Amino acid sequence: MNNLIPSKINLYMTGLTKAPDGGLVEDPDMRREINLLKSFAWTYVIESPALAAQQRGQRELVRCLFNYYRDQVTSNPHALPSWARSYREDEARMDAHETAEAAYVRLACDIVASLSERQAFAIYSRITGRTSGTVLEAILR
């Protein structure tokens, strides 16, 4: 089983050939197999009633973390990971047409996206008051 996923990925990558017009051509059998796997994923994972509550909880967790970091970007930058603080201070990275608010929203998204699942749950538990943790338990640096 450990070799199944890497071998399938390799098969799908090498199953593409270059067309004379420069595009890519898929092997029809490969496409059918990919469609079947996507159907399984939708049926047994994405639309699974058994996972609906868990998925709702995960959406709430991400929403809460995003709102927390969006607020911290402007009101308490010391609560941000060190890489995010330096990014926030580097105004040269801001696109010419981007407002500071849009840059801060993007930074909050980047922070949440950078979290591991364990980090996300630990931070969520602290900011919602479910656990307090200790100063010695550093989640982010």
Image (cartoon, rainbow, N blue to C red):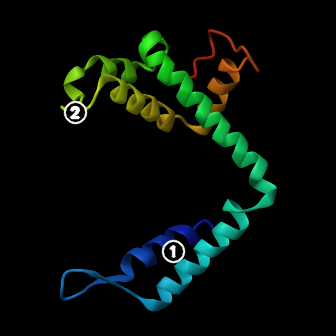
Q: Amino acid at mark 2?
A: Asp
What residue is pinned by disc 2? 95
Q: Amino acid at mark 1?
A: Lys
Give coordinates of residue 70: x percent, y percent.
Answer: 48, 24
* Disc 1, SS: helix
Q: Compare marks 1 and 2 and give the one earlier in the sequence.
A: 1
Asked if residue 3 is positioned above or below residue 81 in the image, the reply reads: below
Examine the rendering and report whether any part of residue 140 can be seen: no
Near-viewer residue (11 or 74): 74
Asked if residue 124 is positioned above or below residue 33 in the image, the reply reads: above
Give coordinates of residue 35: x percent, y percent.
Answer: 55, 79
Q: Is residue 55 left or right of residue 82?
A: right
Examine the rendering and report whether any part of residue 39 can be seen: yes
Quarter of the figure that contains the N terminus: bottom right
Near-viewer residue (135 or 49): 49
* Disc 2, SS: loop
What residue is pinned by disc 1? 8
Give coordinates of residue 90: x percent, y percent.
Answer: 25, 20
Which label sits on residue 130? none
Q: Quadrant of residue 10?
A: bottom left
Q: How many marks?
A: 2
Asked if residue 133 is positioned above or below residue 43 in the image, the reply reads: above
